[in-house]
Amino acid sequence: IAMYQAKRQKLSTRTFEYWMGHAVAQQLHIAKRLALAIANHSFYLHFQPQVDMRSGQLIGAEALCRWWDDELGDVSPGQFIAIAEERGMIVPLGNCVIDKACQQLAQWQRQGLQLQGPLAINIAADQFEDSDLVATLLASCRTHGVSPHALSIEITESGIMAHPDDAIAITEILKGHGMGLSIDDFGTGYSSLAYLKRFAADRIKIDISFVRDMLTSDNDRIIVATIIAMAKTLGLETIAEGIETKAQSEALLAMGCTQAQGYYYGRPLSAEQFAKHWLT
Ligand code: C2E
Ligand code: MG
Ligand code: MG
Ligand code: MG
């Protein structure tokens, strides 16, 4: 039996190493293609509507980065954003997103189309360590003739906690220029109320995981209710992300959530489709 176990262990170790090697090689390949995509700016953005929970009216949108690679095909942001963060490529990738977002806003302006409310851009933790972030955002606005008021920033709760003092200082400056600020994926990090109070956010985004389970899990429903109550006390808007059903929407509205985003209201769309369905 011992011999059999030893043999089995050796075998599974070998299989494990094979798969690990495979996964690492695959990740390296994606990273190489990603570096190329960053150099060529070959990303595009999708836009998802954000609406007022009561009226259903558009109050803004979130820009979500998309990448289609000739060799790899469609790669999800969940995968390539993580690789960019791990391999020190998130700053140039993020700069590319900032530029494309401003470019799109300018194009809609030229077409006489108006986005009601700001366009939210996701900013990763390491971008807050980039001393040029503020200058990059403002320069991009200037280059494309877009007001900083037309932008808002989404930073995850864990992103804030990675560099809290930088995040507080930089967002204060951005806020001074009129940009909005949301705390993304709220409830999944471990931020303290003390930091939240110092942080110049105007909106909290309730993480999709709580919204998904709030109708079946007492815990999740209590967490959502607590986040909404806390935001209200701090004078912040709450936006729930990942709303997929009418029932979720009604429950959130009853709890006092003010804003909504999710497939129930509208999926992320290409610039053309978004303009067709949501812009006037
Ligand atoms: P996020 O910022 O929390 O964005 C919300 C994600 O939820 C998006 O996924 C969106 O497509 C998805 N979503 C929206 N409504 C629903 C719904 O009703 N049901 C479900 N199941 N999903 C919904 P996506 O586009 O795949 O992006 C995933 C994450 O990748 C984003 O999460 C964000 O953290 C990151 N990401 C995307 N674009 C960028 C970017 O330009 N920069 C950075 N730093 N991160 C980005
Ligand atoms: Mg976001
Ligand atoms: Mg989120
Ligand atoms: Mg997320």
Image (spheres, rainbow, N blue to C red):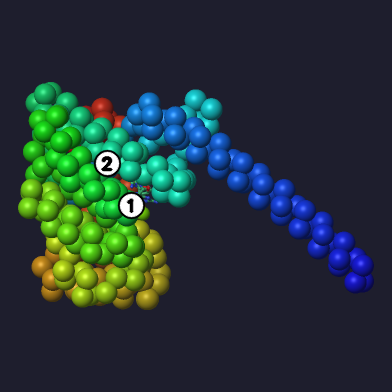
Is the CB atom of the residue marked by disc 1 within 8 angstroms of ligand 1's nearest atom?
no
Q: Name the residue rendered at 17%, 26% in the picture.
A: 107
> Farthest residue in the front direction?
131
| Nearer to the camera, 233 or 213 | 233
Left or right: residue 35 versus residue 19 is left
Residue that badge 1 annotates: 126
Q: Quadrant of residue 12?
A: bottom right
Amino acid carrying mark 1 in the image:
Asp
The answer to whether residue 186 of the structure is visible from this angle is no
Query: The C terminus is located in which quarter?
Result: top left
Q: Is residue 45 above or below residue 250?
A: above
Q: What is the x, y in percent for residue 150?
A: 12, 41
Determine the secondary structure under disc 1.
helix
Q: Few, some or many C-alpha atoms within 10 Å of disc 2 (few <14, some 14-19, many ≥20)?
A: many
In front here: 89 or 211? Answer: 89
Residue 35 position in % (x across, y down): 44, 34
**Residue at the spot x=35%, y=39% of the render?**
93
Q: Quadrant of residue 125?
A: bottom left
* Mark 2 close to ligand 1, CB under 8 Å: yes
Kind of residue at badge 2: Ala
Earlier sequence position, callout 1 versus callout 2: 2
Residue 266 is labelled as none
Q: Residue at x 17, y 56 (%)?
A: 171
Q: Give left or right: position of 203 versus 36.
A: left
Q: Position of residue 185 (x, y in %)?
A: 32, 59
The residue singled out by tag 2 in the image is 63
Left-right relation of 174 to 77: left
